[in-house]
Structures are given as C-alpha cells and as structure tokens.
Amino acid sequence: MKTGILDLITKNRSYRRFYQDIEIPYETLESMIEAARLSPSGANRQPLKYIICQDGKGKTGREIFDCLVWAGYLKDWDGPVEGERPAAYIIMLHDKNIHTTIYCDQGIALQSIMLQAVSLGYGGCIFASINRPRLSKFLDLPETLEILHVVALGQPKETVVIDKTNPDLTAGENIKYWRDADGVHHVPKRSLSELIIKK
C-alpha cells in the first residue's frame, strides 16, 4: 500500500524519547538536508546552512542536549534520560552573509527534514528553545552564522498520537499535549471546521 503525504504528516509527531544506541548513518542525515536543499526558498536566496552531529553520545551530542529546553508543557519531566536521548542532531543556521532576511525558509526546510526522517523510519523534535549563546560558543560559530533551530533525531522509543479523547478542539479549549498512565503522548489538534473560515 502506498504511503501518501497525509500519512507521513500524521506520523510526523514531536518525538522526545529515542533508542539512543541505534545510530543514524551520516548519509541518511545528509539525505534529510538534501530534502531541505531541494525545497522552495524565498527569492531563491537559500540562506540556510546546517551542522550534522551523528554521535548523540559524544561530546558534541551531550553539549547540544544540554542546550535544549525539553517539553515545556510537561512540568514534571526534565527531558529524556541517558539511553533515551537523541542519536543525532541537525543544527539549522542562518548565513547572514547570504542575506539578512530568511522569509519562510526555515519552516519549509524543517518540515522537509522531518518528513524525510519519518519516511526512513526515524522521528525527531524541532527545538526553538535553545541556549544559543552557549551552543554558538561551543561550536565556535562566527557572528554571521546564527542558530535558528536544532532538530533532535533518532528511532522513536515512545508512541505519539493525535488526541482521541478530544479529537476536534474548538476555540478556547486546552491545546497542551499530555501523557497518559502508559506513557503515550497525546497531541490535541483543532478541528478542520475551526480552521477554515467560510465567506
């Protein structure tokens, strides 16, 4: 049976627990960036650059992990424990030497990276809550390379589902994701009828 784009998007959840010992080959991580490279870019300026960290357990992987803020809605959880941390990371950078404006490029590129990851049996989580000064210093980045996002990647060790207890949120309802007693991660979504404004 063919997998359609909606199937991939549905599987593309924010995974935060992984089988840390299952490595992602460097060529596979490159293919995720290739998906981003082939995606549209505002005015075709292509100002995004990337750093690949293949070893989640190595010094670079540990430093990246310590610079990330995990799952803001889960107040009693400090992030994945050793053994459940990401196997790899992709750091997205803005090369300001190319252009000072990035338009909508980062959102398009991040979705492409994630969909390629899911299509290959992996999953990940996109981070915007990052200790950028610390990570920039560790990576010895020039001022012209600005950290935009970090994508944590691996083979998921958790189940993440669209929330079935309240499948169609309406205005004002709770949008916070949550975990049940079995550790299943539930993600509420607004209803299609709320999103489409009819005139």
Image (cartoon, helix red, strand yellow):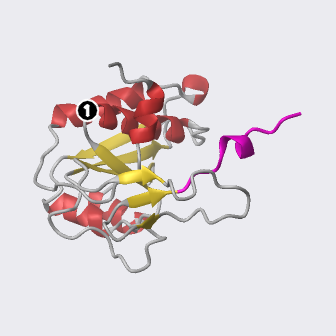
Direction right: furthest residue = 199
Q: Is residue 104 left or right of residue 56?
A: right
Tell me what residue is drawn at x 24 percent, y 65 percent.
63
Magenta stretch, main secondary structure, is loop
Q: Secondary structure at mark 1?
A: loop
- The residue that label 1 is drawn on is 120
Answer whether residue 30 is visible to the viewer in this image: yes
Answer whether residue 14 is visible to the viewer in this image: no
**Front one among 105 and 160:** 160
Tell me what residue is drawn at x 16 percent, y 68 percent.
82
- Which x, y percent locates residue 138? 28, 63
Tell me what residue is drawn at x 33 percent, y 49 percent.
124
Direction left: furthest residue = 21
Q: The disc labelled 1 sits on which kind of residue?
A: Leu
Range shown magenta: 188-199
Q: Is residue 124 left or right of residue 72?
A: left
Judge whether 71 appears above or below 15 on screen: below
Judge whether 38 appears above or below 23 on screen: above
**Front one among 10 and 146:** 10
**Front one among 137 and 44:** 44
- Which x, y percent locates residue 52? 25, 44
Tell me what residue is drawn at x 57 percent, y 52 percent.
167
In which quadrant of the rendered view does residue 48 lie? top left
Direction top: furthest residue = 2
Say which quadrant the C terminus sits in.
Answer: top right
- Which x, y percent locates residue 40? 52, 25
Whether residue 52 appears in magenta in the rendering, the answer is: no
Say which quadrant the N terminus sits in.
Answer: top left
**Front one among 5 and 137:** 5
Direction front: furthest residue = 165
